[in-house]
Amino acid sequence: MSPQAYGNPGVPAAGAQNARSWLQPDARKSRLMYVTDFNNSVVEIYTYPKGKHVGALTSGMLNPQGECTDAAGNVYVANTGNSNVLVYAHGGTTPVRVLDNPGQYPVGCSVNASDGDVAAADIFSPTTGVGAVTVWKSGSNQGTTYVQPAGLINCVSITYDGSGNLYVAGSDSNGPAIAYLRAGSMTWKLATIKGVSSSNLGFMQWDGRYVAFVDSQNEAIDRVRFNGRVGQVVRTVQYDGYVSTLCFFGPSGQRKLATLSFYPSVSLYQYPAGGSPFKTIPLPDVESYAALEGLAISQSS
């Protein structure tokens, strides 16, 4: 399963890792939108919803990809090329934590709202050649790595649900697959979704009530209720436009979806209403759309 064109880590744009991260002084008072650019090893920062370019995270970045946030407004960046996950306070330009992920290439992350644990999907290891999931207990910078969870040979998208269960999407020897780790367990099992071809399921994220999967072939999102490792689609939300990454935000009843789109830009939708975007935010300072892999919206707690 490859919901996005994940790249192989390599050499960043000239001087990218040595450039200084920056943020305009008043910007941290605003809600902020973080957009990763894999090819140029930078995370660009914009205000939300105006879309003003106010900063960039560059120091120590090497081919960043997926992002996630927690309730405190911290932003987690899967820093693929440097085999770690960098954690920034809202509006911060220096990591408050560095979650080491040695020997792995993390491409996505999720934070467990129940206990603060952090999990990363490791697409593959440059040493073993297979994928993994790494979990860091709350407050620890040293993680536990599960190589080939439930037989997955690569892992590309990951999410906790509201009960602390963990799901990862990738592929095994038979094709696209989803693995499941029950809260409190250390044993991975394969998960299934009734009536849905897993080949249609791309990027996934907890939407506050269900696990949401991108159906890239049909420009839709499938909302899935899991009972353990068995899922059932409870609703398919149709969109008039391209949906790739998922970023849900806002209080219950006023939920919104932000997703990366062409040009490059961010498209905003009412959720789970679907339909057409109510706003499109251009990203004029992003240099390479094809390498946009992550999107997060953060607000200071």
Image (cartoon, helix red, strand yellow):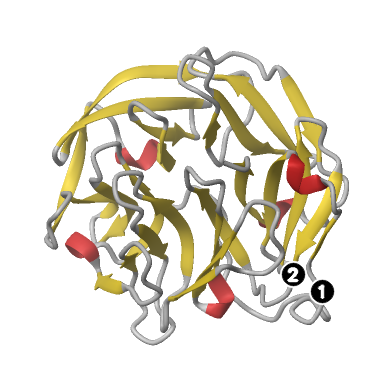
State the SS at label 1.
Answer: loop
- Relative depth, front residue between 234 and 119: 119
State the SS at label 2.
Answer: loop
Q: Quadrant of residue 140?
A: bottom left
Drawn side of residue 18 relative to residue 290, left or right: right
Q: Position of residue 35 (x, y in %)?
A: 69, 50
Drawn side of residue 223 relative to residue 216, left or right: left
Position above or below: 139 against 282: below
Residue ID at (34%, 69%)? 131
Upstream in sequence: badge 2 or badge 1: 1
Residue 8 in sight from this viewpoint: yes
Amino acid type assigned to the residue bearing label 1 in the image? Arg
Residue 1 in sight from this viewpoint: no
Q: Position of residue 48 (x, y in %)?
A: 74, 35
Drawn side of residue 273 relative to residue 157, left or right: right
Q: Quadrant of residue 171?
A: bottom left
Q: Would you call the spot at circle 2 few (<14 residues within 10 Å), some (14-19), or many (20 or more)?
A: many
Q: Quadrant of residue 49?
A: top right
What residue sits right under mark 1 in the picture?
20
Amino acid type assigned to the residue bearing label 2 in the image? Thr
Task: Please say if the residues under marks 2 and 1 sit with CB atoms less than 8 Å apart.
Answer: yes
| Image quadrant containing the C terminus | top right
- Relative depth, front residue between 197 and 156: 156
The CA span between labels 2 and 1 is 6 Å
What residue sits right under mark 2 in the picture?
58
Q: Position of residue 184 (x, y in %)?
A: 14, 54
Residue ID at (74%, 22%)? 279
- Relative depth, front residue between 298 and 101: 298
